[in-house]
Image (tube, helix red, strand yellow):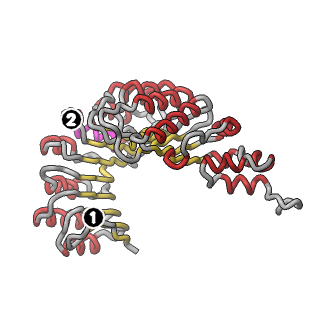
Amino acid sequence: MADPRGQLPEEVLALIFRHLSLRDRAAAAGVCRAWAAAATYSIVWRDTNVSCDCEGEGMLPPSLSACLDHIHNLRLEFEPSREPSRRTATKLLTALAGRAQGLRGLRLECHGEKPLFDAGSDILDAVQAVCKAARALRHLDLRRLPFTLDDALVLQVARGCPELCSLFLDNCTLVGSVGPDSVLELLAACPRVRILGLHLASLSRATLEELAAPDRAPFALLALRCACPEDARAPALPDEAWAAMRRRHPGLAVELELEPTLSADTVRRVLQPSVPVAALRLNLSGDSVGPVRFAAHHYATSLRVLEVRAAASAELDAALEELATRCAGLREVHCFCVVRPTVLGAFRAHCPRLRSYTLKLTREPHPWRPTLVA
């Protein structure tokens, strides 16, 4: 019911304010006392998305700094090559570090190109400051940061975030600097971790054994990116270690992303039969037919998503058709080269749970859009 004086209840105002940008929330809070009170409701700030390109500097007036206490989940977008955007992101993270007691989730996303030789120390230092203060942090997603992540960051997360449940470090970088020992220390300090995204070089047999320990909480997702030189040189993880993981966590899903830097020998070392691969993304400079056939034979019960970026060939078409007949649980398939009509027919006929596919029969202008299955 509306206020008899024509003023909406503060609870209703708060539901409206939660959809505003930070700048508009600040403007709304300055209208009157009732609006200022509504702007401080926790529901306004619980799940907050901030684009530093839209907000600009000065988006955190002193009157609203206290509202940072109410932020539970923050998604922060910025463009590292634009100084105002980057400076705003750093200021916001620094301010949040001083009021991060209630923070539960932090996700950073970069857009555009980063400057050459940019280590991102300003952003990474601010992230570490937040992790040092956010004792209740449960979800940290750094996949969209273009900077090299290192052991110091992981160890700070281990020391400062004992309630952590999910951590994504599998970002796009030319160098992998997170060692397996840091990951082991993180797992020891954060026993509730059940979702982990890593570069292959950050994973070791000891890590798999720790995750398979009897007293470990159920583990749900392991996302592995194999892209930098360190990943290509990483020791092979034995199939028996993966088998033990699968027995301990029958619901485990593994996502594999294989990039052009990997040799054929490295790909063969990564693709072990007992890995419960749910998503396989192949962007290889060499053979893609072999990995597709391997997936058809060993991941038939677990594979849900397949993405292939390769040159068109009759051999690849045949491998895709075989995979379609074996992987009935597939939900998405995206092949970024022209395929023959029988490939499309095979997936439509043998994959009843298919929801989205990119299977083009003729060359089209990019970007290629997926087809949704009704």
Is 76 contained in the magenta span?
no
What is the magenta range? 236-246
28, 15: nearer the viewer: 28
The N terminus sits in image quarter: bottom right
Say left or right for 170 vs 364: right
Residue 184 is at least partly visible in this image: yes
141, 293: nearer the viewer: 141
Residue 367, given in percent of the width and then of the height, sits at 30, 63
What residue do we see at 53% from left, 31% from top? 130
Dominant secondary-structure state across the stretch colored magenta: helix
Residue 62, given in percent of the width and then of the height, sits at 68, 35
User: Disc 2 and disc 1: Cα gap in Å?
Assistant: 29 Å
In the rendered image of this protein, does residue 146 appear above or below residue 190? below
Residue at mark 2: 229
What residue do we see at 22% from left, 51% from top? 283
Mark 2, secondary structure of its residue: helix
Q: Amino acid at mark 2?
A: Pro
Residue at mark 1: 366
In the rendered image of this protein, does residue 34 appear above or below residue 332? above
Residue 172, given in percent of the width and then of the height, sits at 32, 42
327, 255: nearer the viewer: 255
Tell which residue pokes out farthest to the left in this image: 314
